[in-house]
Amino acid sequence: MTATPPDGQAGAAGADMLRVEHIAKRFGPVTALVDVNMGVARGEVLGLLGDNGAGKSTLLKILCGFHPPDAGRIFLEGTEIHLRSVDHARSLGIDVVYQDLALINQLSVYHNMFLNRESVRGPLLSNRSMRRQARKRLDDMGIRLESIEVPVGSLSGGQRQAIAVARSVYSATKVLLLDEPLAAMGAKEAALILELIRDIKRRGDVSIIIVAHNYGQVLEICDRVILLQHGEITLDKRSKDTSVQELNDIVIAEYRRALEERERTA
Ligand SMILES: Nc1ncnc2c1ncn2[C@@H]1O[C@H](COP(=O)(O)OP(=O)(O)O)[C@@H](O)[C@H]1O
Ligand SMILES: [Mg+2]
C-alpha cells in the first residue's frame, strides 16, 4: 500500500506515478465519488474492483481528463496537474481504454490505430507507413488479423478490444487506464490482453489501473487491489495479502446488507 503523504509536505506525492487526493464527483443528485485518496506507483499494476455503480468508470474518467472532478487534486510524478481534456491527459502520457471503446467502426484497423495519436503519428506519416507500423505493432503484440484494411466494425468484439488496448499501450508512456478490458471476450482473446498487460509490466515504467470483475485474473495480474463501494475506497491491499475468497466475501456481505436495507425500508 502506498501511504498518504502528510498534509503540507510538498513533493511527498512524488513516490507515486499518479496520486489523487480527496476526489469527489456528483452527477446531479447522484454521488459517484465521495472522498477518494489513492496512488499508483511507477510500474505498478493496480486492480480497481467494485459493484456496478460503485464509481469505477467515473474515477477512470477523471484520471483520463474526460470528467473534471468537483473537488480534489491530481498529481503526476509529484506535480499537481489540472486535466483539461482526454487529449491533454494523453499528451502527459496518460491513456485510457474505455468500457465503451472509442473506435470508429467505419474506419480501417490501421486508421483506428493512429486515431487521435498525433504525437505517435507525426505530421507527415503517410498511409503506407501507418499501415506498416500498425501491422508491426499488432504482430509484435501477437494480435493476428487477416487484414488491417478492413473496417473495425467488421471485427469481433474481442478483436476490437485488442486493437483499442494495443493502441493505448503505445501512447501511454506513464499511466494506462483500462476499464473492463476483458469484458465480452473469449478465453483466447482475454489471454492475449493479459499477455499485453504482462508485457507492459515487464517494461516496468508504465503504471496500470485496470477495472475487472474476475477476481482470479485480477489477483494474478495485479500487484495491488482497491475496492470501491458507493464511491469510497473500502479496501486497499497487496494482491498477495488477499484472496478470491476474501474479495467475494466482502462483495456478498455488501449485497446482503443492500437486501436487508431494502426489506427494512419496504
Ligand atoms: N454521465 C453520468 N450522468 C449521470 N450519472 C452518472 C454518469 N456517469 C455515471 N453516473 C452514475 O454515477 C454512479 C457511478 O457510475 P460508474 O462510475 O459508471 O460506476 P461503475 O463503473 O463502478 O459501474 C452510478 O450511479 C451512475 O449511474
Ligand atoms: Mg463502469
Image: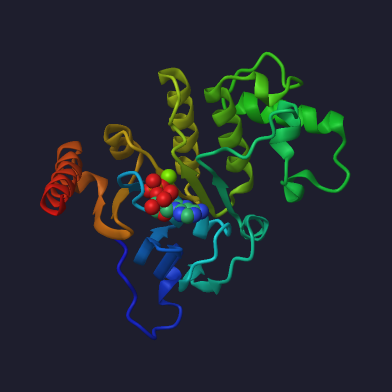
Residue situated in front as seen by the camera: 67 or 200: 67
- Which x, y percent locates residue 96? 55, 47
106 horizontally vs 251: left or right? right
- Which x, y percent locates residue 169? 58, 41
Instruction: Give the quarter of the image for residue 132.
Output: top right
Instruction: Give the quarter of the image for residue 194.
Output: top left
The N terminus lies in which quarter of the figure?
bottom left
Residue 77 showing in the rendered view: no
Instruction: State the residue at coordinates (28%, 36%).
Output: 215
102 horizontally vs 32: left or right? right
191 horizontally vs 222: left or right? right
Instruction: State the residue at coordinates (25%, 51%).
Output: 238
Compared with residue 62, is residue 206 higher up or lower down, i.e. above or below? above
- Which x, y percent locates residue 122? 81, 47
Residue situated in front as seen by the camera: 8 or 234: 234
Residue 215 showing in the rendered view: yes
- Which x, y percent locates residue 221? 35, 38
Compared with residue 9, is residue 100 higher up or lower down, i.e. above or below? above
Compared with residue 57, is residue 41 higher up or lower down, i.e. above or below? below
Q: How is the image coloured?
A: rainbow
How many numbered badges does the structure rendering display?
A: 0
